[in-house]
Amino acid sequence: MKKSNRQPWMDAADFGRSLGPGIGFNLLVRDMPRMVEFATQVLGAQSPYSDEDFAVFIGHGAVWMAHADHSYLDNPLSGILQGAETRGAGVELRIYGRDPDAAETAARQRGFHVLAGALDKEHGLREAVILDDEGYAWVPSLPLSA
């Protein structure tokens, strides 16, 4: 059930046709303003549009979106979400090109959970692991010098 009566910045069908090619993802969230804060302030993404039902994020060469739970009632995933304490278990959402130290600092300042602080890894990246309020694991990273 849509709650917002705000005029969208783009027609939904036009937005859908604008996506791709490539891989995209949609996150289901309980608290849209908090997700927008996380994506923009911690991950360094831009949000060209957000309301209480839906948000679009652009950053680091990707476009992704979030829908509030209440806007997904007719979706097949809605039954799975009922009673789920966290979401995204076992999925890492990697943000290549986001400074992990800056993301870690921003996350700590805003009360998000830093699962692993920024470290240099053997696979050639400096990365951190940060959980948003929904339990999604985000991994901002930068390549290490050769």
Image (cartoon, helix red, strand yellow):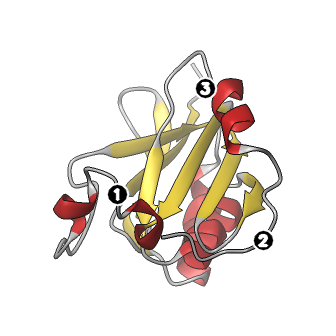
In the rendered view, tell whether residue 75 sits above or below residue 131: above
- At a point 19% along the width and 62% down the height, the residue shown is 79
- At a point 64% along the width and 59% down the height, the residue shown is 55
Name the spot of residue 14 as percent of width and height, x first.
74, 33
* Residue type at the position of mark 3: Ser
Name the spot of residue 61 as percent of width and height, x first.
68, 30
Q: Is residue 122 left or right of residue 126?
A: left
Residue at label 1? 74
User: In which image quadrant can residue 27 be found?
Assistant: bottom left
Name the spot of residue 122 as percent of width and height, x first.
35, 30
Q: Is residue 16 left or right of residue 130?
A: right
User: In which image quadrant can residue 63 be found?
Assistant: top right
Residue at label 3? 145
The residue nearer to you, when weighing 45 against 19, is: 19
Residue at label 2? 6
User: Which quadrant of the figure contains the C terminus?
Assistant: top right
Secondary element under disc 1, as helix, strand or loop, is loop
Gap between marks 1 and 2 measured at Cα: 21 Å
Name the spot of residue 105 as percent of width and height, x first.
61, 70
Gap between marks 1 and 3 measured at Cα: 48 Å
Q: Earlier in the sequence, mark 1 or mark 2?
A: 2
Q: Dots 1 and 2: beta carbons under 8 Å?
A: no
Does residue 144 appear in the picture of this structure? yes
Secondary element under disc 3, as helix, strand or loop, is loop
Does residue 60 appear in the picture of this structure? no
